[in-house]
Amino acid sequence: MLEVLDLDKQIPKETYEQVFPEMETRLGAAQRAARAAGVPVVIVFEGWDAAGKGKIINRLVQSLDPRGFKVHAVGEPTDTERFYPWMWRFWNLLPGAGDIVILNHSWYRRVLSERMENSKEGDSWRAAYDGIREFERQLTESGVVLVKFWLHISKEEQKERFEALESNEAMSWRVGKQEWKQNKKYQEWLAATEEMLERTDTANAPWTLVEATYERYVRVRALERVLRAIEGEVDRRVSAPPPERKPMPEPADWPPPHKTVLDRVDLSLSLSREQYEKELDELQERLLNLEYRLYKARIPAVVVYEGWDAAGKGGNIRRLTQGLDPRGYEVIPIAAPTAEELAHHYLWRFWKHVPKAGHIGIFDRSWYGRVLVERVEGFCTEAEWKRAFQEINEFERQLAEYGTVVVKFWLQIDRDEQLRRFQDRQNTPSKQWKITPEDWRNRDKWKQYGVCVAEMIERTSTTYAPWTILEANCKLYARIKALRTVADAVEKVLDKR
Amino acid sequence: MLEVLDLDKQIPKETYEQVFPEMETRLGAAQRAARAAGVPVVIVFEGWDAAGKGKIINRLVQSLDPRGFKVHAVGEPTDTERFYPWMWRFWNLLPGAGDIVILNHSWYRRVLSERMENSKEGDSWRAAYDGIREFERQLTESGVVLVKFWLHISKEEQKERFEALESNEAMSWRVGKQEWKQNKKYQEWLAATEEMLERTDTANAPWTLVEATYERYVRVRALERVLRAIEGEVDRRVSAPPPERKPMPEPADWPPPHKTVLDRVDLSLSLSREQYEKELDELQERLLNLEYRLYKARIPAVVVYEGWDAAGKGGNIRRLTQGLDPRGYEVIPIAAPTAEELAHHYLWRFWKHVPKAGHIGIFDRSWYGRVLVERVEGFCTEAEWKRAFQEINEFERQLAEYGTVVVKFWLQIDRDEQLRRFQDRQNTPSKQWKITPEDWRNRDKWKQYGVCVAEMIERTSTTYAPWTILEANCKLYARIKALRTVADAVEKVLDKR
């Protein structure tokens, strides 16, 4: 792609002075419009060292209200960041609705500087590209404006700029070994860049290549592109019909004509109190030991609990954590999203809670809310929950590729058992706080949930993040099975190392 | 203090079995009550290695709903944390209203393990103790329940425990050089501990010393103390009259009988456009250079902008940042707090935005909102804004002690000038977005603000964080003065190094 660029492109001063000030005014207005329409904007600047990324960013932000943007320089990951999956730190940088984030270097570091400097090879690149494409697709599909620039200069131009910087006392520190190495190996970097552009120039997140020899040209080209992207998305939103969000109707066929995974669950499975206590002790001891081994091996684990109301999630989690060292795990309760969370991609808040390497994150409800309660109640659009299956699988695969052990539980009870438990809660003063009118409302939608749960399990049970259904009419049975499942999954990963 | 403890204290099994289960049930209820009353709880466990901190924490959390607490093990600061003032990471750990945070080690690391291991001496300890006392006072005064435990065992007991751990294959990794060193230097650690307890055993945040030889005793003692603290605060809140928040009345005397700092401002100061442009260029170049020097020296800077509506804060900030490298600064706009921010101490959100070492944080409005708009409008109680002066001075001193350059601007205009600008905004289509009905409402409260601003400047202008009043009837003059003030302040600090 890059060989076709005309690096002599420039804009005469008079033309520039005619068009540029007007573009700057338009950009300020576009920012306010994006704020009003709730459009988040991410602008990525990649390019050769000394290609002028800092300069153009600086110029760009001068037209912006400083209260609505952030600039991040992306360097090597810090030691904290290394304890999380690669994409974690970029999720943390994402703008909320109406905000602008400008990046000087980005997630492309991984396939450029880190690749060139570490010369890792093989499948890790394939995975990195997958991760990048998925990330960008997830963002843009959710309505993020994403603009990516590659600032291009020739080897000779770069050399001249380095020499100019070196001869300026205040600037010389900006040119070091690393920079000269890039210039020397320009051809190899060029090949890596071409590959990167080819693999990530997608319909939803295309690259803008900028001939960066002349500054005026860069300014006009960059502002033009940013303006077009923001104004386009704002127009699209303003003229689009308001998204339709409606509750799921009751399924026409009930029970479903085809048996689902839930129909095959044997709810008669049970365990005696005596057997339970014996196994519980053994499992808790085993889990404590595994927790330490995870910590030492720096392997993270994610345990997801989903299930019917009153299926026994709380008590199950309590037994799982009872014997653990609290420094090594965290229970993350998932309630309705806050305003800040709603202003981001729905996976954003879960990325924030991904456990650190060596730690266990136990999710009491999870990202599956999108294909359960949000789908049933119409809290999201049909398009949103439909694409969530893929987004979730991608998310979990990224966790797994980082080495995370992923265990997911669905606690299954039948409708009669739920009624018994609701009534018991209502009639026992010490348990009344556990039951709310919402539980009763959810119960009325048992059939809708039945359809959603079956589809969820069928579509998101993967080799790297399989579902385990817990037969939970007998709480004791479900607890022992959960603890054993976690222990086995963790042990399997540890023993492979 | 510690020499009076009876380390043989224990509780007979029968008594324990009688009282403990009931305490656990009460703790669950206390947690729910704290949640309902919006009480945040911080429980700190400090003590000798192998004194059983992990064990008691583990026991404690078993009575809690896992959805409402977090346990943090506080180790050495990470490399990221070292780029911020010492207390920064603890502010980040604080619970919101209704949440519980349990700490295994805490801010006391600094005066214990770090002191013992680095043997720093002199004034840095005094500053550390000041910082700790201020932090704890700020928290407890804002209604945080803070319980601090010191788990005490004898030298011999510790030795026995280390040996027992070492002889257990799964546990032996927990005893290393560091641990044996503490046992060997038990007497020196004891002296440091005594000093720590004496210096930080305050009325609002007293220590609870726990004889930790026998586990049952520790459990009962710790739960008892936690219960008493949480239940006490919940009762206090429930029975307290609702806090009175009312707008500030118009001052009786106007103009004030005694001249204030604002009366001495010479608003006739001005600058010609020609002179302005010359100085602006020079100053912006100088500031870019200083920005790089700050970055290299890893010194953070904080610039605060406060001022009347339409005094020109936005334009001033724009000139300050125009010539800077956007990787090195961030503008932090301060609007009304979010729900999450309201659930924390009011300084919490500002701590989160404190700039990283080497970076410049520019606050467009700031923590002074508490003694300005919140005081005038009655968004906080009288007690809250009254203690804010001290809290702010403490906060800024902690920044300054970390090496932060602190510059604070008040943009002063007169009431006629404000009216001219409001009308201009209203009559110029491209500026109409800048004026809101709120601006007019604020204008009606000019006298109240006058009183607040004068008191604010008088009480929070310190040697380490002085106010600079910008005579802003002439915007050009105010901009040049602001840029020069920042440049001079930064240069002074850099030249001292």
Image: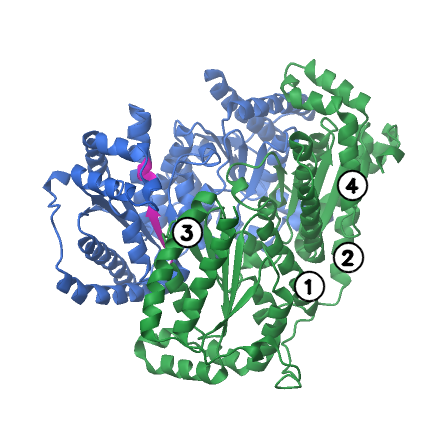
Chain colours: A blue, B green
Query: Up-down: is B377 above or below A61?
Result: below
Sequence-first disc among 2 and 3: 2
Q: Is A323 positioned to the left or the right of A395 in the image? A: right
Chain letter for mark 2:
B
Tell me the tag on residue B235. Answer: 2
Q: Say which of marks 1 and 3 sits in front.
A: 3
Q: Say which of marks 4 and 3 sits in front.
A: 3
Chain letter for mark 3:
B
Amino acid type of the residue tagged 2 in the rendering: Asp
The residue labelled by disc 1 is B387
Find residue B410 and report its horizontal and vertical position in percent.
52, 69
Find residue B324 and report its horizontal and vertical position in percent.
37, 55
- Label 2 SS: helix
Q: Callout 4: 10 Å neighbours few (<14), some, many (20+)?
A: some
Query: Up-down: is B436 above or below A244?
Result: below
Magenta stretch, residue numbers: A98-109
The residue labelled by disc 3 is B291
Q: Is A86 positioned to the left or the right of B192 in the image? A: left
Chain letter for mark 4:
B
Amino acid type of the residue tagged 3 in the rendering: Glu
Asked if marks 1 and 2 touch (Cβ < 8 Å), the reply is: no
Q: CA distance from mark 4 to mark 3?
A: 42 Å
Amino acid type of the residue tagged 4 in the rendering: Leu
Chain letter for mark 1:
B
Amino acid type of the residue tagged 1 in the rendering: Arg
Residue B363, magenta (yes or no): no
Q: CA distance from mark 1 to mark 3?
A: 35 Å
